[in-house]
Image: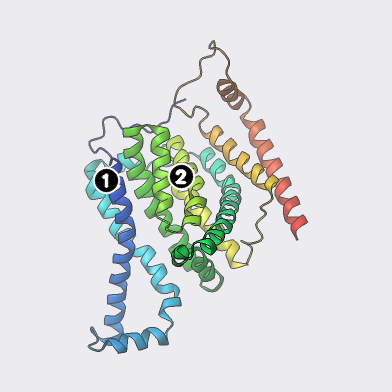
Amino acid sequence: MRFPLKLAGFRARGPGLAESLAWTVFYLATQLIAFVVFLTAFLGLAFGGWPSDINEIVELMLRIDFDRSFVPFGVTNLLCLFLIIPAVRLRLGPSARNYLRLGLPRRNHLILIAGAVLPLAVVSEQLYRWSMALWAAAAERWPVIEPWSRANTVDTMLDFARHESYPILVVAIALGPAIGEEIVFRGLIGNGLTSRIGIRAGMMMTSILFAAAHGFPPHILATVPIGLFLHHVYLSTGTCWTPILVHFLNNLLVISLARYDLVENLPGSPLMVICAAAYVLTTAAILNPSIDGTPAVVNSPVSMDSLWKRIVRSRVPVLAAASVIVFTAVFVWSAVAGS
């Protein structure tokens, strides 16, 4: 079984490494541009034009707690799409839809990937906890890196999730970034890099750029496995809508858990993390057993890799059921034992 995503014959060739770096910077810049546009419009409406005295702006910001308001954060996430989507369309030209692969996903794929969202969140959250502990120790030893902690937007997002309107959070935090980031990183950058430097190297480099766009080192580390899974889902299903869905569900899960102060209570025992990682890997193997795109040869010498592929092919229902049962049992046991 081969990955269904093929770039041969497309009129638009994807970006190489240098251009991919530029697109990563551009993605970050769109957030700043969107914020400036929003701020300009906001001040224009508030004062009927640009105020002549800067103190008036400062006084208004302090009065409405602008720096702690969700409005600029949420609006910026959505405004970014009005910059990102046209820019990607301009870069790819008429073949943009085919290049990005915007066909509808299959139902069985949707069921598989939806089931992997919670295990993926368990792995990512535990990586974040470990990396935060390392970061705290490093900041204590080297105080010069402490200011970098201000780049951590995770705590800010979780705080917003506890107080803001849930429907607005779903659109601004869960849906907006899912669409924008997947179009740029999996759709544009990912296709370009995998076609130029190979599937494995392209997936890894794309995931690193995707993680780096999140800024804060512990958050970067926790995002890498999510990026790899999203890219595998994209290549396996052949449509950009599947990583968008996984990304959306992951964001939705985080804000839902934060809404009820449950993020910190997400089980993170070694057994739990191992079972969650096994669930995610099994889902990835079921989606596409032939990771390297080469079909297994029945009469070839049996290696551990080919044996695993044959087991996956012949025991998909068994593997799926075992993954669900084991993960669910360990998750419930960990949650009860920790309560």
Query: Does residue 196 appear anywhere in the picture?
Result: yes
Q: Report helix, strand or loop for mark 2.
A: helix
Amino acid type of the residue that numbered disc 1 sits on in the rendered structure = Glu
Q: Which residue appears at 28% of the width and 40% of the height?
A: 16
Mark number, residue 157: none
Q: Which residue appears at 52% of the width and 43% of the height?
A: 110
Residue occupied by mark 1: 19
Amino acid type of the residue that numbered disc 2 sits on in the rendered structure = Thr
Front residue of 231/26: it is 26
Query: Does residue 152 appear anywhere in the picture?
Result: no
Residue occupied by mark 2: 242
Q: Is residue 216 above or below residue 102?
A: below
Q: Which residue appears at 52% of the width and 51% of the height?
A: 222
Q: Report helix, strand or loop for mark 1.
A: helix
User: Picture quarter containing residue 207?
Assistant: top left
Whether residues under marks 2 and 1 lie with C-beta atoms below 8 angstroms apart, the answer is no
User: Residue 50 in the image: x percent, y percent?
Assistant: 23, 83
Q: Is residue 139 above or below residue 68?
A: above
User: Residue 63 in the image: x percent, y percent?
Assistant: 41, 87
